[in-house]
Amino acid sequence: MTELILGFITFFTSVIAAVVGIGGGMMLIAILPSFLPVNALIPVHGLTQVSSNLSRAFFGYKDIQYEVIPKFLIGSVLGIAIFAGILTFISLEYVPLFIGIYILLSLWSEKFNEKIKRYENYYLAGFFQTGLSMVVGATGPLTMTLLFKDYKDKDKVVSTGAALMSITHLLKVVVFIYFGFLFFDYIWIISAMIFGAVLGSFVGTKARNLVDGKKFAIILKIMLTILAINLILKIIF
């Protein structure tokens, strides 16, 4: 029964992610504690998100902006290597707060964008998004915010974002395997969630074509804003 429920939930969140480009993974990680033990949350979520993002990238492969991938990959490998090594020595409690503030300023402040533009790049995005994804579930908005500013076409933003998030989650899964997490213990739950994720990506990609480009930009901006505020409020309260 748990497998069916999680498969349906993953389908629903994957549809949202495929339409808007973000939000589905965060919804899923918020729901999973009701079904899985704490030690399995991030590994199972990560493997499911690999399938969700890879399938979303596959269905929109023509729109992926491949020139950003090598930069992001280099930053990601460095990020996962460094953060995996120092996680036990530092406190990352307030990282979500800074991510939330960065996203809000990036979306709504022209002065901030003028000053930050010289430092924003896909190397740094990969480094922080993938490195911090080991402990912070909400790193996706980092890259989506950057893509949203670089590309105005909704399909380019969503498909490229999916490709980059695939790298993040794949590297994270490799690290958990290295640390000895036994994914096979959750094989049926993972199988159901992967099926739901791929089916959701397919349905969501088709549904995205029904959304007007200008409306999509507004929806994505609102979604990113809500996610950023949620990150900030969680830390404050």
Image (cartoon, grey):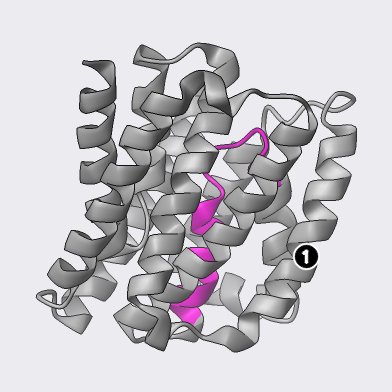
- Residue 70, position as x, y percentages in the image: 72, 78
> Three-letter amino acid code at disc 1?
Gly
| As drawn, 195 above or below 90 | below
- Residue 198, position as x, y percentages in the image: 31, 54
Is 136 inside the magenta-drawn segment? yes
| As drawn, 184 above or below 207 | above
Residue at 26% x, 34% y is: 7
- Residue 157, position as x, y percentages in the image: 41, 76
Q: Is residue 157 visible?
A: yes
- Counting every numbered tag in the picture gives 1
Q: Horizontal placement of 132 versus 82: left or right?
A: left
Residue at 45% x, 31% y is: 233
Question: Which residue is the site of mark 1?
Answer: 75
Is 86 inside the magenta-drawn segment? no
Task: Please name whichever residue, 221 or 49, is drawn nearer the observer in this view of the structure.
Answer: 49
Task: Please name whichever residue, 105 or 152, is drawn nearer the observer in this view of the structure.
Answer: 152
Residue at 48% x, 35% y is: 45
Span highlighted in magenta in the image: 132-149
